[in-house]
Amino acid sequence: MNNKILEFFGESTRQNHSWEEILKNQFCPFTQSKCFKVRKSTPEISIGTCTVRYGRDSKDVLICPHRLLEKKRVFADCVHLLTLHEPGNELHIVSEISIPGGSVDYFLISARKGKVKDFVAIEFQTLDTTGTLWPERQRLIKEVTNLNNVEGADSKKTFGMNWKMTAKTILVQLHHKIETLEHFNKHLVLVIQDHLFNYMDSEFNFNHLSNPALLGDSMHIHSYQLNEGNKIFELDLINRVSTDAEGMAKCLGLQAEAKVELKQIITVLEKKISSHTLFSLI
């Protein structure tokens, strides 16, 4: 198959599946819910594209941040940053918490009897696309199903990768957020794919980052490789680097002021944790 979409609704397009049923359900196995990526003109239709093959060097590129939720391994890789975590504490994952500088994708929390003892803020970032993936999606559907007259499959429109804007935007956001978290001696982790990390490393000043990462640094970057085995794609942590708020400023030459009371953040987190947010390492 020459189609550039490698994972569609969480399933490898290099394997045989009941694609018509998958299209009907529009289910994302990573969020355990309907795929949130919808077509603006027809919002009842989920796009379902997770990973694509792109460029002359055929990079396998993640384009959906929820793809990083695979088996929740990225959260397990952050547990060591819960420096106040103790045996007997519960682990929770909560999402979309606002702090100065913007909203944080996830918090990994160590709690006991409903009280937060420690937390790690975690941001996901995958590549933003340009153009449109819709024709490629429709050609895939035409290839893997018995459906005829798939609308848009003959379109010549293409897609690209917005490397520069993706990298610059997330680094600016991180710089604003890390000052808040560093003020309370907490960690912020950026979870990205190796291709995006390599681009950042080439375009920004990353020479001062600690490699391997240091536990005492407030800002950590976890880089994952997407490996293909038996036509199934899996994430593998391959690199961890770290710095602090000053180091982020060196990357961008920007300034940010973000000071809030730690109690305010903890109050919001404690309202969010419940039996539904429990996270187990087993």
Image (tube, helix red, strand yellow):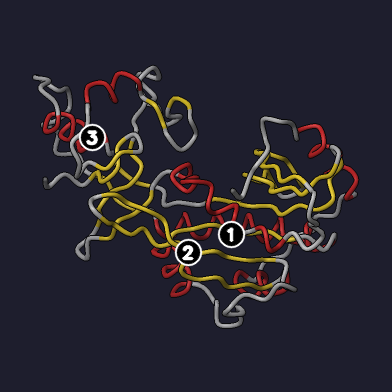
- The residue lying furthest to the bottom in this view is 207
For badge 3, the amino acid type reads: Arg
Q: Are marks 1 and 2 in contact (CB under 8 Å)?
A: yes
Q: Give how far apart the Cα atoms at labels 1 and 3 are.
A: 33 Å
For badge 1, the amino acid type reads: Asp
Q: Which residue is mark 2?
A: 237
Q: Earlier in the sequence, mark 1 or mark 2?
A: 1
Q: How many marks?
A: 3
Kind of element beneath mark 1:
loop
User: Residue 143, percent across and down?
Assistant: 11, 33
For badge 2, the amino acid type reads: Leu
Q: Residues within 10 Å of mark 1 (few under 14, many from 20)?
A: few
Q: Nearer the viewer, residue 231 or 129?
A: 231
User: Residue 100, percent across and down?
Assistant: 77, 48
Q: Earlier in the sequence, mark 1 or mark 3?
A: 1
Hey, which quadrant is residue 187 in on the image? bottom right
Q: Which residue is mark 3?
A: 137
Q: Nearer the viewer, mark 1 or mark 3?
A: 1
